[in-house]
Image (cartoon, grey):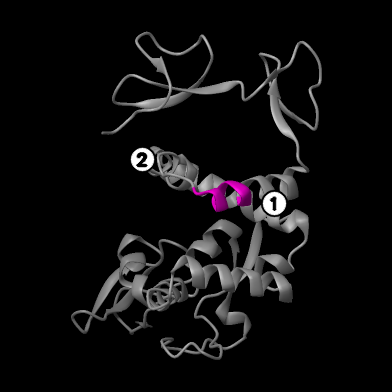
Amino acid sequence: MKQPYETDHIDPRWEEGREYQLVCGLYVSQNLAVRETFLNTRKSNRFIPWRVCEEELGGVPIHPGDLCQFLDLNTGEWVLEEFMGEWWFEKTRELCGNHISGEQTKNLNHSSEVQSRRGSLAYALGVGIHGLTKEGRLGINRKINERHKEYGTGRFDSELQRELANRPRSEQVITSLKKRNTEVHGGTRIYNNGVVNKRFKSHPGKEWELGSLYKWYNNGLLEDKFVRGKQPDGWERGRVKHL
């Protein structure tokens, strides 16, 4: 079970490969603070220079909301702002590891052929996600699913799903999908009894119908999935067709 609190370095410790990092926070008690896990994750290794001056407002930035004098890298001036406030997060956006990693990935080759080779190699070597346990992979998938649902991306992006569904599939793709279904689901198929969906290798009985309980419906402009017979008035079976 993930702990609700973590120990955070107020000024991040330097690590090999972090050429962008501006400071090396020493591993001493004065540089450590206990934070809620979600807050520590959001903070990441963000940092911006700060100072404490006699007879001037501002102290050592330890807790969110602490007033401190931070260096505005855009103007070169010291300004009094809240630690981990909106201004602080905006000014440190381009100085954290997540941003740097994102910039680096822009230069990678994202073609399907190259990505496929990388995936096959990672699987063979048992590294990356393939080095995790089944439970670990499921945990990551759940988090990704929650994030996609929150932002309406991935399988929750109706425009993307419509575009994918309308793509013509070659015989090679159809064969690959069938093989993948066998590997992941053991050759099972989806059946429903009017209440729930379940997977079975063979027909489970007369009260079960082959196919998902949820079907696609559209009103000519929008599309969504509903239980058969419970779709809104004016909605017809099928997906939106674009000419």
What residue sits 41% from the left and 42% below the top? Answer: 157
Q: How many numbered discs, if any?
A: 2
Closer to us: 104 or 58:
104
Q: Which residues are magenta?
A: 170-176
How many neighbours does mark 1 have within 10 angstroms: few (below 14), some (14-19), or many (20 or more)? few
Q: Position of residue 180 (x, y in %)?
A: 67, 50
Look at discs 1 and 2 and give the one toward the viewer: 2
Q: Mark 2 is on which residue type?
A: Glu
Quarter of the figure with the C terminus? top left
Q: Main secondary structure of the magenta part?
A: helix
**Which is nearer the N-term, disc 1 or disc 2?**
1
* Label 1–label 2 contact, CB within 8 A: no
Secondary structure at badge 1 equals helix
Q: Position of residue 165 (x, y in %)?
A: 44, 39
For disc 1, the marked residue is 138
* Residue 28 sits inside the magenta stretch: no
Q: CA distance from mark 1 to mark 2?
A: 26 Å
What residue sits 44% from the left and 91% below the top? Answer: 19
For disc 2, the marked residue is 159
Q: Is residue 171 above or below residue 75?
A: above
Closer to us: 202 or 222:
202
Q: Mark 1 is on which residue type?
A: Leu
Q: Is residue 37 above or below residue 220?
A: below
User: On the rendered structure, is 169 left or right of 49?
Assistant: right
User: On the rendered structure, is 117 left or right of 190?
Assistant: left
Q: Position of residue 212 (x, y in %)?
A: 62, 25
Q: Is residue 205 above or below residue 44?
A: above
Locate residue 140: give its quadrant: bottom right
Would residue 47 be visible to someone looking at this image? Answer: no
